[in-house]
Image (cartoon, rainbow, N blue to C red):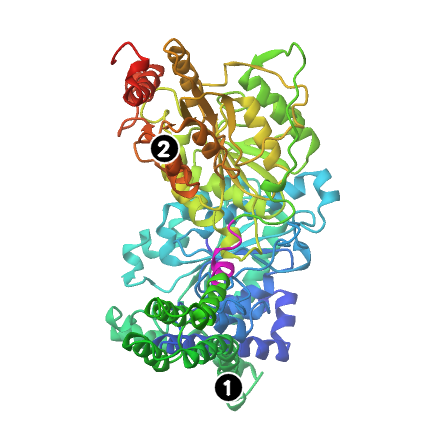
Amino acid sequence: MIENAIVKEQSYSKVTKAILEDKAAVLKDFETCCISREASLLARKEVLTGKAKFGITGDGKEVPQVALAKAFKKGDFRSGYYRDQTLMFALDLCSIEDYFAQLYADTENDPFSKGRQMNNHFATALVDPTTGAFTEHTQQYNVISDVSNTAGQFPRALGLAEASKHYRASKTLKNKSQDLSIDGNEICFATVGDASTSEGIFWETINAAGVMQVPLFINVWDDGYGISVPKKYQTVKSSISKALKGMQSEDEEDNGIDIYYVKAGDYAGLIDTYLKAAQKARRSHRPVLFHVDDVTQPQGHSTSGSHERYKTKERLQWERENDCILLFEQWINEQGLASPEETAEIRREAKKAVKEGRNRAWKQYFAPVKNHLDRLKAIYKELPKYNEALQAIKNELEMLINPFLSEILQNAKRAKYATIGMEAETRAELLSWIKSIEVLGQERYHSKLYSDSKRSALRVPVVPVKYADQPEKKSGYEIINAYFDKKFAEDPRLVAFGEDVGHIGDVNQGFAGLQKKYGKHRIFDTGIREWSIMGQAIGLAARGLRPIAEIQYLDYLIYGLEPLSDDLATLRWRSAGQQAAPAIIRTRGHRLEGIWHAGSPLGMILNSLRGMYVLTPRDMVQAAGLYNTLLQSDDPALMIECLNGYRLKENVPENLGEYTVPLGVPEVLQKGTDLTLVTYGSCVRVAQQGMELLEKTGISVELIDVQTLLPFDLEHRIVASLKKTNRILFMDEDVPGGASAYMMQKVLEEQGGYRYLDSKPISLTAKDHRTPYGSDGDYFTKPNPEDVFEAVYQLIYEADPARFKGKL
């Protein structure tokens, strides 16, 4: 039976009774609710008057969130969505000024994202941006940077909760990680609007949490609608707690979830149930669904529309009568904790405090903008009356009211264009001002995409690989298995997981035998659920563990691409360097057979994972070196091993587990003079086979393995080769215009390689469709050695036909 929080007073715990009898604490909660409501109301006005662009507010959820704050302890994590401002106020993680600074996208005073995220997207410092070291999580309330994508908070919430399980299970971690966990007692509180529980990732996550038994505490704010769509069209039985009843635990031994049903206006019942549920979750690690019903939404979904368009008059009247703050106030008055006059005064003071805080936030935001504006106006006064266009631009600047800095810069750039031909010294200050603002914009909006700390992957020292005079040869899977064995012995923070990773050691035996050696809590299987596997990696990494999360085949990455693109790849950037999750996503791809096991969608990956590194080693020796680089860094990455390379024999390095392969540094595998061939991964071997055929024609090819696509050729080694050969071929297994086009843009445009071309640049790629299953489908669909021969021969023949006996 679903537990009901509307309970009689005598059933409250002693702790709850003590809280309810503390008049000052209760009135402080009421004040917090009133401040949060006034902030919501005023935020909407700021948008409508043009001082802010868009806003989503948390009105209607105030009382449940001050109650939740009672159960939230230091060390806990919040993985929420954009309506949790009251919780942040209650935990003293957000001031009124902070709230409005983010609404104004104040790059100096928004403490959560430095103007990179819209309002109500919160974050706390989980790492030191300079050193890359983690902060003391157990001494603070922790908030992982919010995301806007619907239900996107759930995948990483699973990992954040799972970390507590790992810290509790490992004796070694208990002794070494007191700043990150105290015996795994930490809860991850996830919050979500009721309509978003319709998303597949919600169901995937809650199922996984039940199977895994981790302390994930899901709070569902149920206001009856998903924007304009009533919940009867969203959720079976119109109730998420009823819909999930089959997952409810029946006894202490099963792996179900605990379900609680509460009402948004029941302050006392909310506190009592939160405290009991949280205490149980800490002890048992059983996941919780906390269904908060009868939530209202006084201003509708957002500042872009009105809920009067889709709510009936009866519903609107019901919401006014059942507003949680109104019910809270009535309870305070009935309990004799304060008179109606006293609570009315608290409301008035809250309104006053919010207005004053708003004014301070606006002044802090606009003062620097005004300084830039005034400086530009002074520069304009020094400019002569050069032409009518310049005068019009000056007039436009005077007409701007509360302008954004970008509007001022736009005006200045147009003045720059209007003064082309003016004496250089006269324009110098204008040009200098423009440059300074562009530099400012660069720092404000383009920094922190990747780590620039001491532990950046690009700063890891290079340790060359060493071989014996007569090196032993082993299959690729044996080399990578031996590497993982060494690393797991060295670092207790390392965990690896995914489909078939644990018991059988992954489908290609990279972890074979290692679960038995290091335990099921470090190397383990998961269900078939790529989206939440990626979330596990994010959450575990954000809490100080070093996860290697496996996607069985590169084709399946599409299932897990959303959390990587929207969350992991942007985490450091959107938190302005305050957070990092150095997760390693391991997969295998390129060549095999069939539509679903031979994919190489690198163009899609490169375009969606800026903020992560994408590594494409040609063999397992190189893969081990790249892993070693990553494990010394604080950057996240996707590692794509060669699916057809596990059985190929390689020389075994003497210093396996010690050498590193630098990121962004291509390797010249064979020198040549006629053409530069640029490729990666399994295509390296195909290129080598094609080059063997070309040797008989006297054509000399310089073969370059880029090794990593993100970052790409930081030292411009490819263009150095192009200067010598003056011809270039880009080769890969992606569709035409995919990763080959990316490489071409990097070399010819970014590196200026176009200047050295004596022939047109060409690309050799797969066909437009996926690889057929037929045994010869790979040959006809993806580049083969004969394709390499013909593409290179044709290009060199066109340039110098006299060298050859004739056309192909």
- How much space separates mark 1 and mark 2, taking CA atoms? 69 Å
Q: Can you say whether 565 is above or below 67 in the image?
A: above
Left or right, 314 with respect to 724, comes to left
Indicate the secondary structure of the residue bearing disc 1: helix
Left or right, 537 with respect to 417, comes to right
The reply to whether residue 357 is in sight is yes
| Quarter residue 406 falls in | bottom left
Q: Nearer the viewer, residue 682 or 400?
A: 400
Indicate the secondary structure of the residue bearing disc 2: loop
Left or right, 283 with respect to 591, comes to right
Name the residue that disc number 1 marks: 352
Left or right, 19 with respect to 151, comes to right
Query: Start and end of the magenta stretch?
Result: 441-449
* Crowd band around label 2 with a 10 angstrom C-alpha radius: few (<14), some (14–19), many (20+): some
What is the three-letter code of the residue carrying label 1?
Lys
Q: Is residue 443 magenta?
A: yes
What is the three-letter code of the residue carrying label 2?
Leu
Q: Nearer the viewer, residue 427 or 226?
A: 427
Name the residue that disc number 2 marks: 757
